Image (tube, helix red, strand yellow):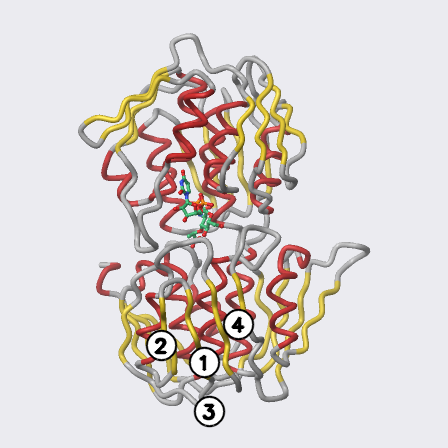
Amino acid sequence: MAEQQRIVINGGRRLEGEIAVQGAKNSALPLLAACVLCGGESALHNCPRLSDCDAACRILECLGCKCKREQTTVTVNASVIKGTEVPTSLMREMRSSIVFLGPVLTRCRSCRLSFPGGCELGPRPIDFHLAALREMGADIEEKHGYLECTAPKGLHGARIALSFSSVGATENIMLAAALARGVTEIHNAAREPEIVDLADFINKCGGRVSGAGGSTVAIEGVESLSPCEHRIMPDRIAAATYLCCCGAAGGELILTDVNSGDLRPITAVLEQMGCSVYSYGKKREENNIFINLHRPLISPGTIRTNVHPGFPTDAQPPLMALTTIASGTTVFVENIFENRFKHASELTRLGAKISVEGKVAVVTGVKSLSGAELVATDLRGGAALITAGLAAEGTSKISGICHVDRGYESIEKVLRSVGADIRRI
Ligand code: EPZ
């Protein structure tokens, strides 16, 4: 059913109103995996209603955990882990399922999962994950597309230097190290805010993680972890997407329940483009952002994606959609994924002028876009098509909406609530 769903947008309507931003998908997934470490029932609040979170809960249930969702609270009872195999179907459905390897292995001393499928962004290997776990004492055999992982004597601490600040590898190592014997140090660790959220959760459960958010994270393994309650951080990429939607359609938006600090790389670019953006909130908590656009958009120049605190690769597609109608030429350099410009060819169907050469895309701003039939092939690329559709004159029909539903909770309802003419059919 979800495969055939499409979104229809009649563009050109200004946005006006307030959006409460959903919980972060890219924090919810490692946190759901982290529940495997705790013997008992943990509760994750502000957990977004997304197909990726549903898939993660199905994996937990395959392992013998009990999951329950009430609104945006998901409780996970991991008192007993009955199985240590993640089924191929679920590994294929969601590449980031690899983050279950660390926690299952460190708690159960064995784990069997199939190689996560490549994805629309390029091969996305897991070599950093496997190399690190081997350094911690895991025996990992790759055969017939399966990973047979064992650690008969449990995992032990290690000093791990990542050649690239991989988010998933950093998370997997933190989860494996939480119950390993001794101290693990991760050098050149990912510094994304989701890493800090995960460290907070592990520490609330009785773990000992320090340095999260910096380049060196130390994890002192403990005997066991007990369950806890945790509120998932706001989704900075969903927030960035809605800011780009407002820039594209014009108007003014207030986003509530955001961490403005996490959004600085994006809000700085939007201000360069002519948007007025400011954050405010009670005391030091800058948890609201106001954006409005009352002058023509201008190009921000060159955008290079990078690991945090650089410009996030996940915000590149929606920002590209916005730059298609900004005067001037914008150069995007995609330094994180090999193949993350697939949305460019779809945007040109709306009249955008984009030329792609390897990891560089050059966008020449046009006066206006006009509606067309579009196909989403990945999550953030789909968000880019919706962003551009809001600006395009006339009707745009976007298929492949199942990709968008992986990361955005009811995106059409959210945008309709602030004045967009958008519906799902
Ligand atoms: C996480 O993916 C996010 N996903 C991605 O968001 C995000 O784009 C990415 O981090 C970068 O910020 C989740 O958190 C679930 P990486 P992850 O490991 O962990 C290469 C979205 O749209 N690499 O930092 O897979 C890899 O090929 C998604 O919400 C290796 O070579 O990202 C890629 O080029 C998309 N070997 C680069 O590193 C490895 O062992 C970044 O990967 C691991 C990664």
Q: Are the residues flagged by discs 4 and 2 in contact, CB closer than 8 Å?
A: no
Q: Answer with mark 3 or mark 2, whichever residue precedes in sequence.
A: 2
Q: Amino acid under label 4?
A: Cys
Q: Secondary structure at mark 3?
A: loop
Q: Secondary structure at mark 2?
A: helix
**Alpha carbon of mark 3 to alpha carbon of mark 2: how far?**
14 Å
Please tell me how crowded label 3 is: few (under 14), some (14-19), or many (20+) other residues with Cα within 10 Å.
Answer: few
Q: Are the residues flagged by discs 2 and 1 in contact, CB closer than 8 Å?
A: yes
Q: Answer with mark 4 or mark 1, whichever residue precedes in sequence.
A: 4
The residue located at (68%, 56%) in the rendering is 261
- Residue identified by numbered label 3: 367
- Residue identified by numbered label 1: 324
User: Which residue occupies the extreme top position in the image?
Assistant: 153
- Residue identified by numbered label 2: 347
The residue located at (53%, 35%) in the rendering is 43
Q: Amino acid under label 2?
A: Leu
Please tell me how crowded label 2 is: few (under 14), some (14-19), or many (20+) other residues with Cα within 10 Å.
Answer: many
Q: Up-down: is 315 above or below 206?
A: below
The mark lying in front, picked from 4 and 3, is: 3
